[in-house]
Image (cartoon, grey):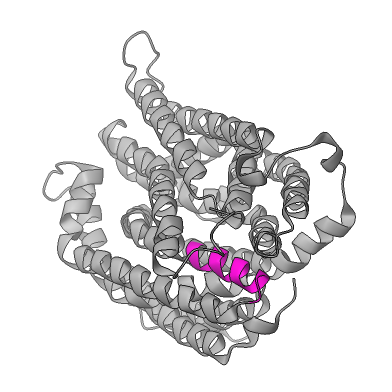
Amino acid sequence: MSTHLVRASGEFRPMLRLAVPVLAEQSLEFLVGMVDTYLAGHALPDDLKTPGLAAVGLMAYAMWMTFTIFASVGVGATAVIARLIGAGETEDAALAANQALVAGAFAAVIGTAALYFGASGFVSIMQLEADAARLAVQYLQIIAPSLPFLMIIAIGTACLHGAGDTVSGLGVMTIVNLINVAVSTTLAFGWGPAPQLGWAGIAIGTAAAHIVGGCLILLLLIGGRAGMKMHLRWLRPDWKMIWRLIRVGLPSGANDALTLSCHLWYLGIINSMGTLTAAAHGLGVRCEGPSYLGAGAFAVAASTMTGQFLGAKDPARAFRATMHSLAAGAALVTAYGVFLYFGGDILTWLYLGKVEPGSTNAETAELTVRLLKIVAFSTPFMAVLAILAGALRGAGDTRFPFMITMIGQLGIRIPGVYIVALDVIPLPIIGDVPGLGYGIVGAWWVMVFDVVVRALLMTVRYLHGGWREIEV
């Protein structure tokens, strides 16, 4: 793809050739977490199902946190490599890929130590209770050693995306999922000669899958996939190239870190409402997850095509490619939003199975369905937000998305959840003041409003056109 994307006629078909493999790849990546959630709802004893779902909900954020550690390097790598490929500078593009992995290795060492030794403190801050807290700490400590391999998956795939190769990641994630399903299920239930490890088995299977996936991406890069060949001489730190990657990606990494921090703040407030509420929130986030996949896939297409077309000095094609990505992505994500609204009970049944009326699990399912009807209204706006942000990142315009995130998260979501969701708002100096008390339902409406406002702001920034002039 990297050799003929710029020379291909039109933009729609090249966009689909980029987006469809990424959609499949991200769907398979999502399936890793989906399997964990499914097993928590089926393999654990009844008294641990709701705590298990609450723990899995936090684990989804924890895995997001690990990806955020590598975001600055990954986004910078995609933008720089796409621009270099578009300009025909393939050797410099390969150097950038090597240096991205060097920078990622430093981050992986720090992240692994922080995740393993800080697991208990992190879970305590997030206000999970009793069994849910114990399960969450155990999961994090099992998964931590696989973090360097997760880094290779995240950054290696970002490099391949920048080069226009979105197929390799799909192949790797297919294998990752087969391993995750096989190992996690076997160890959770104790099939055959394998021991029945329950919750620990779920985490071990996920870690094993990430290790294999990282090794496969590494082999592809050693073999020179899409021109991104690893060379020992290019693995010595090249501080000029590393700074170039970080300079472009740092605002995006800061954006993701801010988003994650605010989501964790938001999650901590929700977890303080009790284990049932935390479980419903975690299950709701898992059910709405596929909408992010569609938006993310077309965001990658918009990012890669924008970077390569700008490298070829053709901003008009970059704009058309983004519009094609936006139209297709918004249609797909909105269709899933309709399913969320009308089919939420199907999704909760998939994760929880048949529940006894009046039980805690039944209350979790009922509350989750209510939340899915709320978030369904945000899906078209979320597609606009993600895809236009992807296009801006591909152009190297990462500062404005960061500012828009600050406005939404710190100006709307966090203050809003305190005011709308809580009965009592604790304020420094002033003391407690009354809130509206709408609970998690109110918190999810605040989340929808935040997405709508940020989508509108991102649209204004993109149409302004300043991204056409940015140098990377």
Q: Quadrant of residue 419?
A: bottom left
Confirm whether residue 271 shows in the render.
no
Q: Position of residue 292 (x, y in %)?
A: 40, 62
Q: What's the residue at 53%, 60% (across, down)?
A: 5
Point out residue 51 in the picture as x, y percentages from the top left corner.
37, 44
The x, y position of residue 263, in whole percent, is 51, 65
Residue bounds of the magenta highlight: 301-313
Quadrant assignment, res 332: bottom left
Tell me which residue sits at (67%, 59%) in the image: 85
Q: Residue drawn at (60%, 30%), measured in percent from left and top?
A: 215
Q: Residue furthest left?
A: 357
Whether residue 418 appears in magenta in the rendering, the answer is no
In front of the other: 258 or 424: 258
Query: Which residue is located at x 78 percent, y 44 percent?
Result: 102
Q: Predominant secondary structure in magenta?
A: helix
Left or right: 436 with respect to 229?
left
Is 158 located above or below residue 375 in the figure?
above
Most foreground residue, 156 or 352: 156
Residue 10 visible to an observer of this rendering: yes
Image quadrant where one finds the C terminus? bottom right
Q: Is residue 131 above or below residue 97?
A: above
Q: Is residue 305 magenta?
A: yes
Q: How many circles with numbers are drawn on the protein?
A: 0
Above/below status of 470 relative to 207: below
